[in-house]
Image (tube, coloured by chain):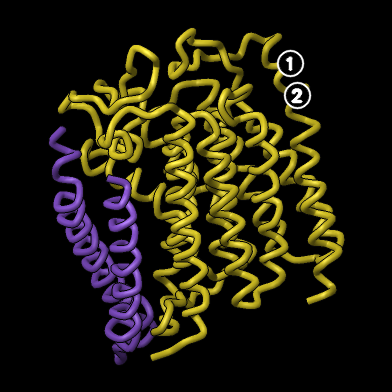
Amino acid sequence: MKSNLYGFLFGMWLLIILGGGILVVIIGPINISGFGDFDLIINSGIKAIIAVTLVIIWILILSKLKNWIFRKEIKS
Amino acid sequence: MIEFLIPGVVVSAISFFIVIFLTPPLIKFLEKRKMSVPDMNKKEHPMVVRPGGLSIICGIIGSELILYLFFQMNEIIALIITTTGAFVIGYIDDRKVMRGWFKPVMLAVAAIPILVFGTYDSNLTFPLFGDVQIPALYIGLIFLIIPITGNTINSIDVLNGVASGFVTISSFSLTICLLIIQNYEVAIISLPLGFVSLAFYKFHKVPSRIFPGDSGALTLGAMYGSIAIIGGVEIIAAIALLPAVINSFLFLSSVKRIVEHREIKGKPVEHTEDFKLKATNDSKAPITLVRIILAGGPLSEKAVGYAIFKLAIFSAILAIITSFMMGVKI
């Protein structure tokens, strides 16, 4: 049982590092210009939407991972 | 680095001994005022006083003000105000039952000093991949981090000694990580959190003589979050906090809304005849870290606490590995 928890922790750690990679490689370089003073707001808005989407995907993956790892325990 | 040695030793000693010397009279004061609650995980349900947040916040403020005499940094002032704000919010919740939204919203307000003093770096640093610049987005992140860390530590305060012991492990690992990435100033600023938690653990461990209450748990959590922001170690701090994050995640994914623990009908943990803890069979009860730990069979309160501490040490090791990875780019 306890090894399952350590596995879940390790899985979360890997997902954080992977998520960081996606943020830096994909979201970081996004730069939209041509809207004058609104450039910063538009850039941040787009980055925020992608980041929130990633967080939702992260939570969904964690939920699947949780159900897979703790299936027996949760049923009990 | 040697110039940080004396301030480091001084603030560590001050924070530790303020809590050690202030908590016993606080226990007596709270006993006189009959500010106590039954410890439901003991056979006789002994009354335990709360909240112990006052000695925790005094230890933090006292040591950080002394540190300010050594280093006149805005980071210290912002941290003191935010942490004190969290203490006040927790104390209000200790004295009067507030709605579920109260703590998250008010903790977001408590984060304002970090913004006002500009004691943050809007670049979010990830291991192996480097920085991502999110200037506007990061401001929103500040308002999320303090409520998350505050409530996460609060939600793990379920058994004798767990919250204080857990924060001791997490905060010392965060200090080590700050030293590894050579952020010595913030490493020294973070030292009182570990020593205050360690000192409070002396009174909070099984059998507890005092509970930290929301004022204590939110103070510890908000200070942890503040250090993560001003030290630019948000990701490392999140990793060191993972067991508590798992607890909140399991709870929220089973309850599916933000609620106070007292609003939950089913209890995740029951007691055996010899008053060991065992996981409930109630399908309506929320899933928590303790319930998952107990799925393998009944354990004493102390054994469950140690199981959580082992998970905290595992996360601390992952955090330290991550801080070494900060210097590596692929």
Q: Quadrant of residue B172?
A: bottom right
x 44%, y 43%: residue: B308
Tell which of B225 and B122 is nearer to you: B225
C-alpha span from label 1 to label 2: 6 Å
Q: Are marks 1 and 2 in contact (CB under 8 Å)?
A: yes
Q: Is residue A4 left or right of residue B159?
A: left
Q: Quadrant of residue B212?
A: top right
Quadrant location, the N terminus of chain B: bottom right
Percent across and percent down for residue B322 are 46, 72
Name the chain letter of the residue that bears numbered label 1.
B
Give the yellow chain's letter: B
Percent across and percent down for residue B63 are 78, 49
Residue corresponding to mark 1: B28
Residue corresponding to mark 2: B24
Residue B105 can be seen in this image: no
Name the chain letter of the residue that bears numbered label 2.
B
Give the purple chain's letter: A
Q: Amino acid at mark 1?
A: Lys
Residue B96 can be seen in this image: yes
Residues flagged by tags 1 and 2 on a common chain: yes
Q: Amino acid at mark 2?
A: Pro
x 55%, y 21%: residue: B95
Whether B216 is drawn above or below B171: the answer is above
